[in-house]
Image: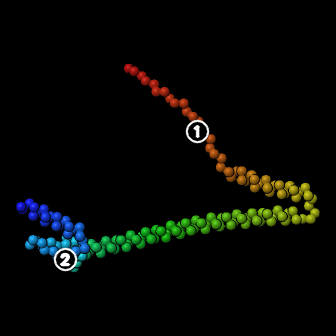
Amino acid sequence: MEKISRKEQLLKELQDLEDLNTEETEEDNGVVYKDPLEHIDEPLQADKKDTKTEVKEKKPRTAKQIEAFEKARQTREKNALARKQSRDEEAIAIRKQVEDKLVKKAIAVKKKQIKQQAVLDEISDDDTPLDEVEKIATRSVAKTRLKREVAKDFPAPPPPVEEPVTPKYYFL
C-alpha cells in the first residue's frame, strides 16, 4: 500500500510542477505541497553575503615600508624626468638636422638661380651673335648633366666567383 501512496504523491508533485499557475500551497492527504519556484525572487545565498558590507581594516604600514615607498616614488620621478630630457634632446637634434638640410637646399636653389641669371645676363647682350648664345646655353646644360652623371651611384660589380677548394687528406 505504501508504494501506491508514494506513487500518488509523486504524480501529484509532477502535476504541481506542470501547473505553474498555482502559487498557493495545497494540502492533500496530510501532505503540504509548495510551489518549488516560489523562492526565485529571493536572492541567492552568495548574494546575501555580498550585500553585507564588511569593511576589513588594512594593516597599517610599517615605517620601513613607508620609507621604501617614498624612495621608489622619488626614483620613479627621477627616471621619468631623465626620459623626458632625453626625448627633448633627441627632438632638438632632429629639428637641427632638418633645419641644416633645409638651409643647404635653399643655398643650392639660390646658387642655381644666380647661375641662371648670369647665363641670361650673358645672353641678353644685344651685340652677341646667335652662335655664341647657343654655345653658352649648351655649355651650362652640359655641365649640369656631367655633374648629375658623376653624382649617380653605380652598382658595384659582383664579387668574382671562387671555385670551391677541395680538401686534401694526408694519411700517415
Residue 126 showing in the rendered view: yes
In the figure, 12 relative to 170: above or below? below
Q: Nearer the viewer, residue 9 or 104?
A: 9
Q: Is residue 117 toward the left or the right of residue 60 in the image?
A: right
Residue 100's mark?
none
Residue 159's mark?
1
Q: Residue at image x 8%, y 72%?
A: 30
Q: Residue at image x 60%, y 40%?
A: 158
Q: Is residue 90 toward the left or the right of residue 80 in the image?
A: right
Give coordinates of residue 83: x percent, y percent.
Answer: 43, 69
Residue lying furthest top: 172
| Quadrant of the rendered image containing residue 20 | bottom left
Give the SS element for disc 2: loop
Give coordinates of residue 112: x percent, y percent.
Answer: 75, 63
Residue bearing the label numbered 2: 24
Q: Residue at image x 62%, y 41%?
A: 157
| Quadrant of the rendered image containing residue 29 | bottom left
